[in-house]
Image (cartoon, rainbow, N blue to C red):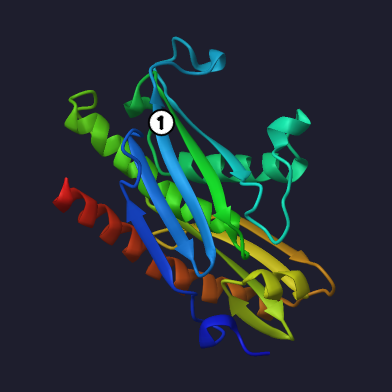
């Protein structure tokens, strides 16, 4: 079927990454993948969770949420329900795991960076957009700490981004929108670093099984897309640094 934005199987939706969108957060990024938009902020705390006290190590964690009208109909805030859904918990743990691969926690010292990912508008790929924008916010927060003299050495050791892939109508495609995602035979979320090493792969046969060849095709599409996204991340950070 025709893809949104008149794309072919290997083409991303229009992607924008705007660093420094928040006046108050140590790091921030407004990320858009087509109609999916996520506001990501990075906040620095001068303490760590109890299990890391007196270890000399820092921590990076994430919280994720969708605004009530991020989708076609209003969803109640999870805070009003008194608990997070299993989906929300799973996504924010994924974001945290992905980001912790980018940073030497010992060089961060005993401080915590909290990444908040708030989905403004959802049209598929919110978790992968969150990870991609979260790297920009995290890197900017580290730059802020260095500029203030809090950190003498950057603890950043890798760059990470993420993308969705799937089998739609028997064809492997990258960066699924909501319509594609809801009808996909196979759904995948792939996290890689800038060197092409896999960080995490979530790949599920929703309505059908898939072959090793199809899996490899999705991984190949993801690697090309993530290479493109990493370039956009670097550009966003460089643009902000020049303007600062």
Which residue is drawn at the image coordinates 70% and 78% (left, top)? 167
Expressed as whole percent of the image width and height from the top left, the position of residue 19 reads 32, 51
Expressed as whole percent of the image width and height from the top left, the position of residue 12 reads 49, 75
- 149 vs 215, left or right, is left
Q: Nearer the viewer, residue 179 or 194?
A: 179
Could one spot residue 7 in this view of the protein?
A: no
Assign a secondary structure to mark 1. Answer: strand
Classify 91 as above or below 171: above
Q: Quadrant of the N terminus?
A: bottom right
Which residue is drawn at the image coordinates 43% and 40% (left, top)? 41
Q: Nearer the viewer, residue 25 or 197?
A: 25
In the picture of the structure, the residue carrying the numbered disc 1 is 43
Q: Nearer the viewer, residue 24 or 74?
A: 74
Expressed as whole percent of the image width and height from the top left, the position of residue 164 reads 59, 66
Furthest residue toward right: 207
Could one spot residue 86 in this view of the protein?
A: yes
The image quadrant that residue 121 belongs to is: bottom right
Classify 23 as above or below 228: above
Q: Dot 1, how many residues are within 10 Å of its Cα: few (below 14), some (14-19), or many (20+)?
A: some
Which residue is drawn at the image coordinates 49% and 81% (left, top)? 11
The image quadrant that residue 51 belongs to is: top right
- 180 vs 108, left or right, is right
Q: Quadrant of the C terminus?
A: top left
- 24 vs 3, left or right, is left
Which residue is drawn at the image coordinates 60% and 62% (left, top)? 125
Classify 3 as above or below 139: below
Expressed as whole percent of the image width and height from the top left, the position of residue 191 reads 53, 57
Number of numbered markers: 1
Furthest residue toward top: 54
Q: Nearer the viewer, residue 237 or 200?
A: 237
């Amino acid at each position: 079927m025709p893809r949104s934005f008149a794309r072919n199987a290997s083409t991303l939706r229009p992607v924008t990454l705007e660093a420094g969108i928040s006046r108050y957060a140590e790091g921030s990024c407004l990320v858009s993948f087509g109609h999916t938009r996520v506001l990501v902020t990075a906040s620095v705390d001068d303490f760590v969770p109890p299990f890391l006290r007196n270890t000399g190590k820092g921590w990076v964690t994430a919280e994720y949420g969708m605004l009530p009208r991020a989708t076609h109909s209003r969803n109640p805030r999870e805070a009003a329900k008194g608990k997070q859904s299993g989906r929300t918990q799973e996504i924010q743990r994924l974001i945290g795991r992905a980001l912790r691969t980018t940073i030497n926690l010992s060089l961060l010292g005993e401080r915590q960076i909290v990444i908040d990912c708030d989905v403004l508008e959802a049209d598929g790929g919110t978790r992968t957009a969150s990870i991609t924008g979260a790297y920009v916010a995290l890197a900017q927060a580290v730059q802020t700490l260095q500029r203030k003299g809090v950190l003498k050495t950057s603890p950043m050791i890798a760059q990470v981004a993420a993308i969705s892939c799937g089998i739609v109508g028997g064809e492997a495609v990258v960066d699924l929108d909501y319509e594609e995602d809801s009808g996909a035979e196979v759904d995948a979320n792939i996290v890689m670093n800038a060197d092409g090493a896999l960080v995490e792969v979530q790949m599920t046969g929703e309505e059908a099984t898939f072959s090793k060849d199809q899996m490899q095709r999705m991984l190949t599409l993801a690697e090309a897309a993530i290479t493109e996204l990493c370039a956009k991340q670097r550009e966003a950070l460089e643009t902000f640094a020049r303007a600062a």
